[in-house]
Amino acid sequence: MVEDKGKQVVVDIESVEDWLSHAQSLVPLALDKSRDVKGFPGRWKMIISKLEQIPSRLSDLSSHPCFSKNALCKEQLQAVSKTLKEVIELADLCVSEKYGGKLRMQSDLDALCAKLDLNLRDCGLLIKTGVLGEATLPISVPGSSTEPEAATHSNTKELLARLQIGHLEAKHRALDTLVEVMKEDEKTVLSVLGRSNISALVQLLTATSPRIREKTVTVICSLAESGSCENWLVSEGVLPPLIRLVESGSAVGKEKATISLQRLSMSEETARAIVGHGGVRPLIEICRTGDSVSQAAAACTLKNISSVPEVRQNLAEEGIVKVMINLLDCGILLGSKEYAAECLQNLTASNENLKRAVISEGGIRSLLAYLDGPLPQESAVGALRNLVSLVTIEMLISYAFLPRLVHVLKSGSPGAQQAAASAICRVSTSTEVKKLIGEAGCIPLLIKLLEAKSNSVREVSAQALSSLVSLSQNCREVKRDDKSVPNLVQLLDPSPQNTAKKYAVSCLASLSSSKKCKKLMISYGAIGYLKKLTEMDIPGSKKLLERLERGKLRSLFTRK
């Protein structure tokens, strides 16, 4: 060592071999001194048993091929030497009985035991982590011919190992560096990350220091969002500490923990586990009281969880219905509202009790109000589709349901348009409702949707029309629309991918009472399609084919 006035260490000039020799020479002295102590026999017996393990650990460490090239080895030997000196000092105090008090000495000996445990554990971990497999290079080596990428990988691997080795403050420093490294080069960290590193990070989530927990969850959030190590995170037990941070962490801790759960909950198995670990209640609380980012992340997490049918009742028991409806009305970010709508769509997919709960909490009014935006999304319309069969038409009319459906059919996303057409199918159960739907202006929009790129949109639009045309005034409106017959004939395509053909046949059968429509059907090639559909036993195709062929025959005789 080179020292400045005997106080501050400036440079450590001793080699790793020197430190090994120093530590090895201290072990027998520490053992002899410990065996001379008469007081505190239980504690000194434990200390002696740990001291006896040190030589083999030092031997394992020194026999590694990269022992002399790795900075961590030298630091570990320095830590062991420091602990051994403390053993000698405390043994001398106990032998001479010159200590400040029995309780204080007991506390000092307990702390010494913990340090010896840490030294033994860290020596083993140094080899297990694999960090000694590569020579650790300094961050900047003037004139070095080593590949920069290899040096970066080696430094990153050492940094990750430091999360597992040493006392808490050393881990804190390593964590600070890791946060900065991940900001600059997350890809390199991910490329060398191992399961043991994940385990070390998860353990740091429960550190007593709030600052360490906050920085750790920041790293874990980045790892979760990367999508490369979700399984490791979950299997190493990340969920319980994340949920505790959502419940009682700092503002940053809550936000990062919630975002982590958002990503992890995309797995159905993990979504179930979050429920099992009691994560629903704190997530619901974040939806009630959190800031904008945390609220959106919590809503998305709950939406992901709600996609698992068997946990929906658990969610309902924690009050999720009311919270999601409130988010739909008052969510800070548009994303929060969308997640709330998706969650309500999931909750109302099959469970009748949950459907009634959403209705009784005023969910229909909130969902309809959410549709007033410029681009209505599928989720809200899908939730309404799930609910309409349990609500009277009078209530729907009082909530301006039909004008909202028209808005969705005109301006909604393809998924929203499909859900709107599906909702029409579900409410078209009476002549009165069919009349109201026709008068609201839905029919031309459904005819236009027969041209949609999506087969499922075309199918449900044809299905809605096939129900509506059973009312004569709706049928007349369809006949008047120039696009109705050509669009429906196109849906007679016999290919397996076209699932709208049976509804197209039904619609065209209703229109075939019109000579004009029959001529149009024939001119657009309906007979050729219907012959194939008849062979496929599509309901109504044979009867419609016969009607068109009779009309074609009559027209031939008329021309003669």
Image: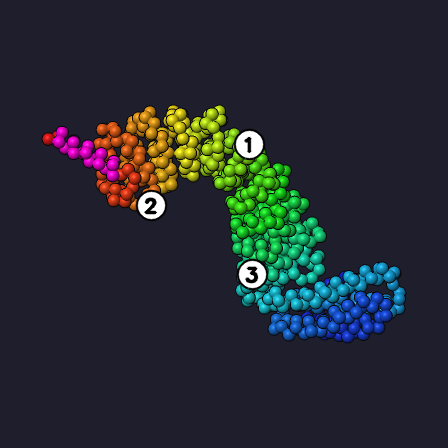
User: Residue 69's spot in the image, x, y percent?
Assistant: 63, 69
Q: CA distance from mark 3 to mark 2?
A: 46 Å
Horizontal side of residue 365 vs 49, given as left or right: left
Horizontal side of residue 278 vs 358, given as left or right: right
The reply to whether the C-beta atoms of the residues labelled 2 and 1 are less than 8 Å apart is: no
Disc 2 versus disc 1: nearer the observer: 1
Q: Residues within 10 Å of mark 1 (few under 14, many from 20)?
A: few
Decide whether residue 527 is among the magenta residues: no
Is 148 above or below relative to 444? below
- Residue at the disc numbered 2: 497
Q: Which residues are magenta?
A: 542-558
User: Residue 168's spot in the image, x, y percent?
Assistant: 70, 57
- Residue at the disc numbered 3: 192
Q: Quadrant of the N terminus?
A: bottom right
Q: Would residue 327 be seen by someone viewing this image from the given angle?
A: no
User: Residue 345's spot in the image, x, y percent?
Assistant: 50, 39
- Residue at the disc numbered 1: 360
Residue type highlighted by circle 2: Gln
Mark count: 3
| Nearer the observer, 531 or 520 | 531
